Image (cartoon, rainbow, N blue to C red):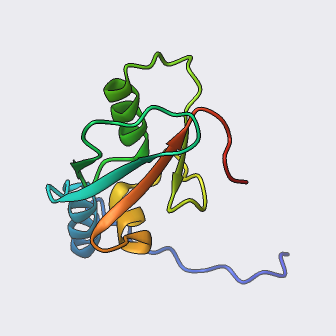
Amino acid sequence: MSDFPVSPARPHSSLPAEPALEALAAYKRRDGSKVIVRFRAVGNAPIMKQNYYKITASNPFQTVIQFLRKELGWKPTDPLFTYINMTFSPAPDDTVNNLFKCFATDGHLIVNYSTNAAWG
């Protein structure tokens, strides 16, 4: 005989709970708002003619990296290092909105970029 109590069988509903469906729908909804991203060159990186752009807040930071490569005319094999506020390099899957909420300066998300590692 087992030392563990046997729980009575619970009826299993085939439909998910309504609050869970609402939460899932809210999570899947894309935020169409935009944030201002200001690019600043570091070291010997080329300076952009226009250094600020409005980028969709729900995009992952990888989108910002790809956009920066395109604007600079760099190939995917060219080295590119990005930093937020000269401090840390964000993960490519961080959302622009989360970075903006946590690290915005004067209403802008400052993205420093260089061709070699500049900060830790």
| x then y, percent, for residue 15 | 25, 62
Residue 40 relative to residue 14: left or right: right
Quarter of the figure that contains the N terminus: bottom right
Residue nearest the observer in this picture, 57 or 69: 69
Asked if 46 appears above or below 108 in the picture, the reply is: above
Residue at 40% from the left image edge and 59% from the top image edge: 110
Residue nearest the observer in this picture, 26 or 83: 83
| x then y, percent, for residue 120 | 73, 54
Q: How many marks?
A: 0
Asked if 102 appears above or below 87 in the picture, the reply is: below
Residue at 51% from the left image edge and 34% from the top image edge: 45
| x then y, percent, for residue 94 | 46, 54
Residue at 29% from the left image edge and 59% from the top image edge: 14
Asked if 44 appears above or below 84 in the picture, the reply is: above
Asked if 86 appears above or below 59 in the picture, the reply is: below
Please tell me in which quadrant of the rendered image residue 8 appears.
bottom right
